[in-house]
Image (spheres, helix red, strand yellow):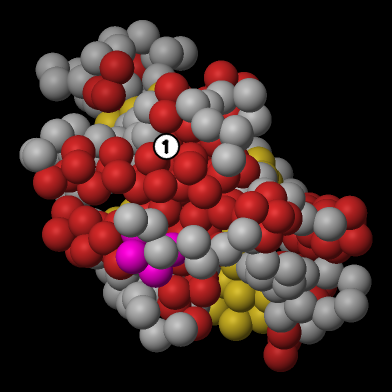
Amino acid sequence: MRYPENTLQSWTNPLSETEENRVDNTIRMIRDAIQSKDELSNVEFEIFAQGSYANNTNVRQNSDIDICVMLKSSFYTNYEEGTSSADFGYTDGEMSFDDFREYVIDALRSKFGYASVSPQNKCIDIDANSYHVNADVVPALQYRDYKIIHSRNKDRFVEGIKFFSQTGAQVINYPKDHISNGRKKNNDTNYKFKKLVRIMKRIRNEMVFDGKLNGEIITSFLVECLVWNVPNSHITKYDSWNDTLQDSIAYLWNAINDGNADEWGEVSERLYLFRGRKWTMQDTKDFLGKMYNYLGFK
């Protein structure tokens, strides 16, 4: 086997306390920046961490954290068929997504300095220093999804976020469901789910570094979602991490190979894992086979 058990065990650990403090500082500074912007002083918004940091599956020190700045006083909707804004008493919001994004950029530049803030296609990048980590800030509007649960009740919806990339692509995610589901699976597996995610992410990073893998296709997010689709009984079956890895990778490869993965969801269980993605089932199956061999399993 490529990695001894003590190495895999060390890879199960979350971020250090020092790194946690720098992340907390970053979130607080972003919140202060938004609250200080005059154009945003009278709107309702929420700031929260998402992605691997929020899910406690981050594996690299000094890695980016994803922060969502979600506007709530204006929001997007997705209605059950046969209903419309008029049925809920909604009218057009006063602030567009484009305006909100520009206000957030201005607020961050005022707080962190113009040179430290770089708007990207989907996010706004803030450079790190000794006090705070590198952050990817995602401005978004709240997404009230009534259709996904067939709701005709104004107060009953699934909350997501919606925004547009600078190339015009629409992006809809459900980060809070992702966090909630991950916590439950972690509890249900005696806290082994997130440990296994961290191990597999570290191995994925090692494979990218060694030139064995295209990290643009096989993302850390995909790895976390694959582990999400491993049954709890497989995650808790063994005391050894090498045995758990071998069994989990084999389960995933066989399920895809046998055509049993089409209905798999991402961790939020609001979006399908293999529909409209940058990766395909074949890409994923190839990755799992390479990982199995990379680890020296027989």
**Which amino acid is tagged 1?**
Trp
Above-or-below relation of 250 to 178: below
In terms of depth relative to the viewer, which is nearer, 262 or 88?
A: 262
- Residue 159 lies, in percent from the top left, at 46, 30
**Quarter residue 254 falls in:** top left
- Residue 274 lies, in percent from the top left, at 20, 48
**The C terminus: image quadrant:** bottom left
In terms of depth relative to the viewer, which is nearer, 87 or 147?
A: 147
**Quarter residue 213 falls in:** bottom left
| Horizontal side of residue 110 vs 206, given as left or right | right
Above-or-below relation of 121 to 69: below
Magenta span: predominant SS is: helix
- Residue 282 in sight from this viewpoint: yes
Above-or-below relation of 154 to 253: above
- Image point 36% across, 9% down: which residue? 153
Per the image, the residue denoted by label 1 is 228
Q: Which residues are magenta?
A: 291-295
| Horizontal side of residue 282 vs 224, given as left or right | left
Above-or-below relation of 51 to 168: above
- Residue 215 lies, in percent from the top left, at 39, 74
- In the image, farthest residue toward the bottom: 115
- Image point 33% across, 65% down: which residue? 293
**Quarter residue 26 falls in:** bottom right
- For label 1, the crowd category at 10 Å Cα-Cα, with few meaning under 14, some 14 to 19 and many 20 or more, is many
- Image point 42% across, 13% down: which residue? 156
- Image point 42% across, 53% down: which residue? 223
